[in-house]
Image: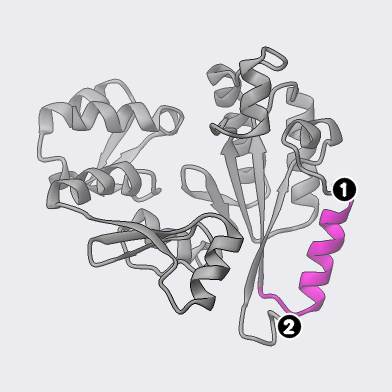
Amino acid sequence: ELRTGGFTRISFGMQSAVPHVLRVLDRTHNPAGVPQAVAWAREAGFEQVSLDLIYGTPGESMADWEASLTAALACEPDHISAYSLIVEDGTALARRVRRGEVPMPDEDDFADKYEVADRMLRDRGLGWYEVSNWATSADARCRHNLLYWQGGDWWGVGPGAHSHVNGTRWWNVKHPAAYAGKLAAGESPAAGREILTDEDRRIERVLLELRLSDGMPATVIGDDVRIDEQVSRGLLRRDGGRIVLTDAGRLLADGVVRDLLD
């Protein structure tokens, strides 16, 4: 039905191929179903298939992570997103961490697993175009997400969805029943909004656009001393009038952004 409706791309939240890792993430799907879902998507005529992975889950060994990458690559996806685990407040995992039942994710573990992912994905022909995203070609890149990273406009539909148009951002109520109730009453489901200042937009541009493989114009920073400090540390390189994260810089992208903006 989705393909008939005009959708050409589909993404599956695989997260891991290892059952005990999925249990910690509170994910209930059977990892054996992922290749079947991908096969069905291909049979339905989807031109592009993407898989999402999460690394750094408490209790996940390097062998577990390599097994997940191997299983994902065996599905021959056009695109893979691999994100380090974020322990969100209010989740079951956050409560388990707070009670000491599982440890907090480790930054060094994140770095090691990121490097393994980058190597394995590159070896299979998927090149990085954003810190956490790899694609088989420029055509396979996620154009929707590129709008986020390049400060474009988008409409978000559904509970909790965010939208951004011309510097105004708004977000919907989170609970599905509340969202449905608003629509049934003919009311806007928006829960709040904000208008970004020029400085807000500049900061967000640095935070997001610098994560792309072709970087961003150095003029957005406007401070050669700060840029040169990051270049000397081996975290940035200059490419014409642009600044681009090095491989080492990708591991410390948030810190690089903070140092450029402080």
Q: Position of residue 183 (x, y in %)?
A: 51, 75
Vertical placement of residue 181 versus 176, above or below: below
Q: Position of residue 148 (x, y in %)?
A: 38, 57
Whether residue 34 is in magenta: the answer is yes
- The color scheme shown is one colour
Q: Return the disc, 2 or 1, that comes first in the chain's sequence.
A: 2
Q: Position of residue 136 (x, y in %)?
A: 60, 59
- Going by the numbered disc 1, the residue's amino acid type is Asn
- Going by the numbered disc 2, the residue's amino acid type is Glu
Q: Check disc 1 and report the residue beneath it.
A: 30
Quadrant of the rendering where the N terminus is positioned: bottom right
How crowded pointer 2 is (Cα within 10 Å; few <14, some 14-19, many 20+) is rated as few
Q: Residue at x 70, y 75 (%)?
A: 46
Quadrant of the rendering where the C terminus is positioned: top left
Left or right relative to 222: residue 29? right
Q: Quadrant of residue 28?
A: top right
Magenta stretch bounds: 31-47
Whether residue 168 is in magenta: the answer is no
Question: For the residues marked 2 and 1, what is the alpha-carbon distance in whole angstroms?
Answer: 23 Å
Q: Position of residue 172 (x, y in %)?
A: 44, 60
Q: Check disc 2 and report the residue beneath it.
A: 1
Q: Secondary structure at mark 1?
A: loop
Tell me whether circle 2 and circle 1 mark residues in contact (CB < 8 Å). no
Secondary structure character of the magenta stretch overall: helix
Q: Residue at x 10, y 40 (%)?
A: 222
Vertical placement of residue 73 versus 227, above or below: below
How crowded pointer 1 is (Cα within 10 Å; few <14, some 14-19, many 20+) is rated as few
Taking depth in this image into account, of 95 and 166 the one nearest to the observer is 95
> Which residue is situated farthest in the bottom direction here?
4
Q: Quadrant of residue 23?
A: top right
Vertical placement of residue 75 versus 186, above or below: above
> Which residue is situated farthest in the front direction here?
185
